Image (cartoon, helix red, strand yellow):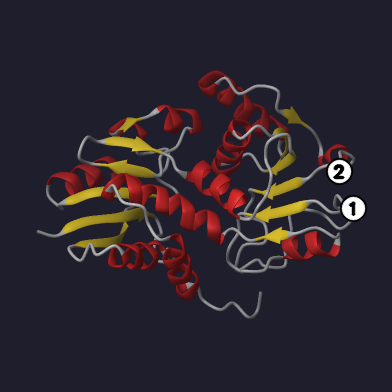
């Protein structure tokens, strides 16, 4: 009998998750497992989940944009999914759901030797990935500041985290104010710099980047972003976001299979599947 898992989104053709998961499944000898892409329009999410579970033979799913919030009423979200207000992993065997995005980020930072306990971290953005970053960083013991272009959206994000996860003591500043702090880590959780808009950067040239700070860019296409170049020009260490994608996927893999994925195998497969965007 074949075991099927996959990723749903709209669009989803760009996802490299099938390549990295199928490589990981092969590496652990699960020849009867397959990971697929499934494009689902936003207006039929609930119906599609039931069909994939009851008729499609799927054991579980990853969920990507724009469905991470839309699936919540149709599954049993755990405390992490509720705190983040979003789901990225579903296990149909008990209809449970969680979010492994924060695991992917924190595990990748640790894998790069970034010390988080007591670190002064700045999160740029207030969307779903920023929420996961704040949640994970606070759990890891970092001192967290948030900057977002729309202050009200960032305030709403922090209010949600206070209410759902009792996360407090997160500072909300302007970028000019945050740049004056002695920061050790800056995480770009915005889409600025993502292909095909590789010339954009979340940190304006008019504001000096904190000298020597590590910069982590959740963007992984292009592999080297304008933000990463700025970090290195300022004497810091730049890390791209492909490792977060891989490690959040590895956490999903463990939920479905009960086995630990080979992260190096997943990373190599994901990297090989990414297009070469020479123009970026």
- In the figure, 187 relative to 97: above or below? below
- Quadrant containing the N terminus is bottom left
Looking at this rendering, what residue extends furthest in the left direction? 1
Contact between marks 1 and 2 (CB within 8 A): the answer is yes
Which quadrant of the view contains residue 182? top right
- SS for tag 1? loop
- In the figure, 104 relative to 155: above or below? below
The residue carrying mark 2 is 179
Name the residue: 63% across, 61% down. Answer: 240
Mark 1 and mark 2: Cα distance apart in space:
7 Å
Q: Position of residue 169 (x, y in %)?
A: 70, 23
Which quadrant of the view contains residue 91? top left
The residue carrying mark 1 is 208
Name the residue: 55% across, 61% down. Answer: 242
Q: Earlier in the sequence, mark 1 or mark 2?
A: 2
Name the residue: 86% across, 38% down. Answer: 181
**Direction from residue 124 to residue 102 in the image, left or right:** left
């Amino acid at each position: 009998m074949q075991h099927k898992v996959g990723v749903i989104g709209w669009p989803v053709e760009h996802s490299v998750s099938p390549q990295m998961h199928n490589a990981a499944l092969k590496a652990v000898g699960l020849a009867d497992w397959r990971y697929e892409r499934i494009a689902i329009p936003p207006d039929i999410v609930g119906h599609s989940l039931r069909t994939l579970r009851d008729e499609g033979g799927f054991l579980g799913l990853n969920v990507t944009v724009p469905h991470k919030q839309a699936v919540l009423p149709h599954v049993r979200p755990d405390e992490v999914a509720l705190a983040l207000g979003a789901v990225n992993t579903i296990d149909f065997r008990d209809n449970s759901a969680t979010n492994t995005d924060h695991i992917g980020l924190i595990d990748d930072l640790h894998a790069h030797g970034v010390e988080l306990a007591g670190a002064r971290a700045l999160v740029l953005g207030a969307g779903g990935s920023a929420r996961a970053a704040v949640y994970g960083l606070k759990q890891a013991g970092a001192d967290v500041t948030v900057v977002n272009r729309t202050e009200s959206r960032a305030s709403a994000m922090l209010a949600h985290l206070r209410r759902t996860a009792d996360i407090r003591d997160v500072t909300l500043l302007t970028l000019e104010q945050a740049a004056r702090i002695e920061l050790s880590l800056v995480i770009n959780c915005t889409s600025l710099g993502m292909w095909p808009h590789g010339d954009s950067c979340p940190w304006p040239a008019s504001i000096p980047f904190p000298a020597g700070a590590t910069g982590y860019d959740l963007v992984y296409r292009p592999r080297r972003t304008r933000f990463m170049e700025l970090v290195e020009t300022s004497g810091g260490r730049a890390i791209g976001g492909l490792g977060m994608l891989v490690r959040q996927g590895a956490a999903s893999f463990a939920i479905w299979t009960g086995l630990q994925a080979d992260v190096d195998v997943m990373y190599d497969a994901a990297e090989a599947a990414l297009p070469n965007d020479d123009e970026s």
